[in-house]
Amino acid sequence: MKFAHITDVHLGAFGEKELRDASLAAFESAVKTCVSEKVDFILITGDLFHNPVPDMRTAKETAGILKKAVDAGIKVFMVYGSHDYSPQSASMIDIMEKAGLITKVQRFNGRKLAPLVDKDLNVLLYGIDGRKNGLDQEIWRSIEGTVEPEKGTTAIMMMHLAVKELLPSDLSNIDALSLSELPKGMNYYALGHVHYPATANINNAPVVQPGALFGSDYRDLENTAKGVRRGFYIVDDKMEPEFREVKVSPVLIKKVKLDGKQASLGYEEAMKAVKNMEKGSIILLHFEGKLAGGKPSELQLHRIKKEIIEKGASAVITNETKLEYPEALKAKFNGTVEEIERKSLEKSIAEGKVKALTVDQSLELLNALSSQKEDNEKAIDYEERITGSAMHILGVDDE
Ligand SMILES: [Mn+2]
């Protein structure tokens, strides 16, 4: 018996099409390895998608990749992650399940966790779905153990949650269970949720956290650039997990140092910084230093991105949080954030750009802003709906 353990693929994350494609390519590469290595099944411990309902192109490509596994006779078992969870079982994961591409694992027998028994594979799979805001931990603590696994079968526990002992130091404060709280008697513990790879043991059974396959945000990409490994595990019948690195494109941090320089030199310095980059790289362009003069527009970020792509990068992400503009420029905006917001609002109201609100309108606005995202609503549609109704109440909608 041989299986693969993949997690936190976050398909559909990132606004840039190039990064969405890179994460699909990482998933495709992992599944191809599973097919060529003839694994019997694949475990995905949550966050296959970045949203319960991803964009249709991402969904279509993912279905195509999963179909390759299914056609090769490889079963795919899943639990929800905190990102693709749906309280009404109406997410893309559920569509994939109805289409026979995957099988969800979580089952209960009263308050005990019950296994999905696969006789062909001779495995018992227990699973707990990931939930948002640590709710899965609450559910986890309410469970009265597991229905005992039969002897002679391989028992696997799938979970989308953080375990203290496997956390990197910068995440040591997040809500997490400890190894001692996991149920005893399993042969393999498959974890998801935390985006760094790590392993541990309970009574000689491996506890494995593969980490994000590609990453879901710029911080993940920075960690990749700094050396955090991205990949998944293949586990043989001796239950020895082996990490398989998946590298679709190099991720590189390039620093653009502008200390004592004019902002207008940003373009030249950025192009110097990427002079010897490998083709197909994902470039994280970090601007830093105390500028002698100039303003943000003089950096020409748009031109910089366009030209680095033309030189062969697959994506360019810029970061200016460590760039300081001269005092003269800052002085225009002095005061606390609140003071600046107040002044700016007063000015807009005086100029008739924004109207002052009545009590009723204020309540209406609060109500509109607290509207929850619908289960099947895409983040972008939700944002548009909320912004639209707020703008309407504020009287600044553009027809
Ligand atoms: Mn995740």
Image (spheres, rainbow, N blue to C red):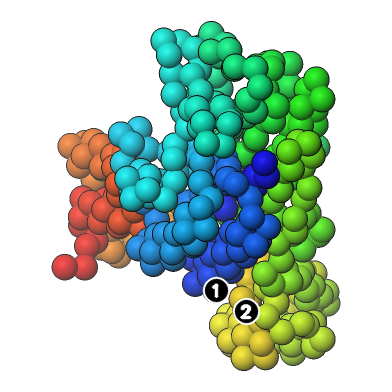
183 or 397: which is nearer to us? 183
Which residue is located at x 58 percent, y 31 percent? 122
**Quarter of the image with the N terminus in it:** top right
- Image coordinates of residue 169 in percent, x first then y, are 80, 37
Residue 59, given in percent of the width and then of the height, sits at 40, 60
**Is residue 166 left or right of 175 when viewed as pictured?**
right
Q: Secondary structure at mark 1?
A: helix
Q: What residue is disc 1 on?
A: 18
Q: Which mark is residue 314?
A: 2
Is the CB atom of the residue marked by disc 2 within 8 angstroms of ligand 1's nearest atom?
A: no
Of the pair 137 and 120, the residue shown nearer to us: 120
Placement of 366 over or under 33, stated as above or below? above
The residue depicted at 51 percent of the width and 41 percent of the height is 77
Please name whichever residue, 169 or 73, is drawn nearer the observer in this view of the structure. Answer: 73
Mark 2 Cα-neighbour bin, 10 Å: few <14, some 14–19, many ≥20: many
Q: SS class of the residue under badge 2?
A: loop
- Above/below status of 43 relative to 21: above
Disc with the residue nearer the chain's start (2 vs 1): 1
Q: Which quarter of the rendering shows the C terminus?
A: bottom left
User: Alpha carbon of mark 2 to alpha carbon of mark 1: how far?
Assistant: 6 Å
Question: Residue at left 69%, top 17%?
Answer: 185
Tell me if label 2 and label 1 are in contact, CB under 8 Å: yes
- Ligand 1 is within 8 Å of the C-beta of the residue at disc 1: no
- Horizontal and vertical percent for residue 91? 35, 45
Residue 56, visible in the rendered structure: yes
Crowding around mark 1 (Cα neighbors within 10 Å: few <14, some 14 to 19, many 20+) is some
Q: Residue 30: x and y, percent?
A: 63, 59
Is residue 30 something that shows in the picture?
Answer: no
Q: Amino acid at mark 1?
A: Glu
- Amino acid type, callout 2: Ser
What residue sits 80% from the left and 20% below the top? Answer: 203
Q: Is residue 193 above or below residue 129?
A: below
